[in-house]
Amino acid sequence: MGAGSNARPERITRRDFLGAALAVSAAAAAGCAGARRVQLLTPTPTAAPATPQPAAPAPVGPATSAEEAMARVIPVTAVAPGAGPRKPPPVRIVIPSIELDSKVVPVGTRTDAAGNLIWETAAFAVGHHRGTANPGEPGKIVLSGHISSPREGNVFHRLPELQVGAAVILYTVETAYLYRVVNREVVLPTEVRVLEPTGREQLVLITCVPDKVYSHRLVVTADRV
């Protein structure tokens, strides 16, 4: 899925990551949605590209661009410990009601020489956060995308139009999965409760809003049909 060519790294602090990483689930060594100073998709300085690794994200700071506003999301583990073999990750998302048809690429993190965690955002694609569920697995499948970015596209520019009841289809290399939107809300970056793991399969779509302000997060939740 070409994470190296479709994702751009962003910098987050180790303190913020560890604050998030101590409680959501031991399975992926990820973190708690209630951790201190954790924010949804929040900004940081741009770092040099690098090879991605396993996933997680989290932190703080005023956004000056779409890329910065998408720079962090809390680490979430959607798959229960001992859940068995993993299913394939998503490679494509289709939302007919907003005419979205996009590839999906993995986004992950690495640690730089200074000990900072670098989190990637997807360029001209939807990003699937490593450490979250894959289609067909219990828990939350977390996908994010830019609402507008001159350098990385605007794959989620019509996400604010998505309504409850709308269909969302995720494709893997094996099959397709259908979801129906059950909730949409605009939250502050600190409202990480929206990513708390659940026992059932859910799809979570996130982008920064309003366009060119990026002060809040639009979170759309869909249940498996």
Image (cartoon, rainbow, N blue to C red):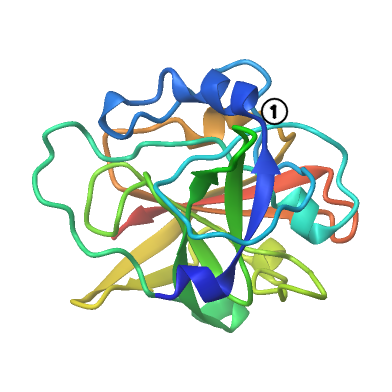
Give the image location of residue 83, x and y in percent: 13, 39
Q: Nearer the viewer, residue 98 or 128?
A: 128
Disc 1 marks a residue whose amino acid type is Thr
Q: Residue at (63%, 15%) from the top-left corner?
A: 36
173 with respect to 158 (left or right): left
- On screen, residue 51 versus residue 12, left or right, reads left
Which residue does the image show at 83% across and 50% down from the upper left?
A: 214
Q: What is the quadrant of the N terminus in the image?
A: bottom left
- Give x and y (percent) for residue 81: 18, 31
Q: In the rendered view, tell whether residue 13 sits above or below residue 47.
A: above
- Quadrant assignment for the C terminus: bottom left
Q: What residue do we see at 60% from left, 39% from top? A: 113
In this view, the residue in front, 168 or 68, is 68
Can residue 33 be seen? no
Which residue corresponds to mark 1? 190
Q: Is residue 156 above or below residue 44?
A: below
Q: Position of residue 38 (x, y in %)?
A: 64, 26
42 lies left or right of 55:
right
The relative height of residue 19 versus residue 128 in the rendered view (above or below) is: above
Q: Is residue 93 shown above or below 59?
A: below
Disc 1 on helix, strand or loop? loop
Residue 121 at x, y percent in the picture: 61, 59
How crowded pointer 1 is (Cα within 10 Å; few <14, some 14-19, many 20+) is rated as many
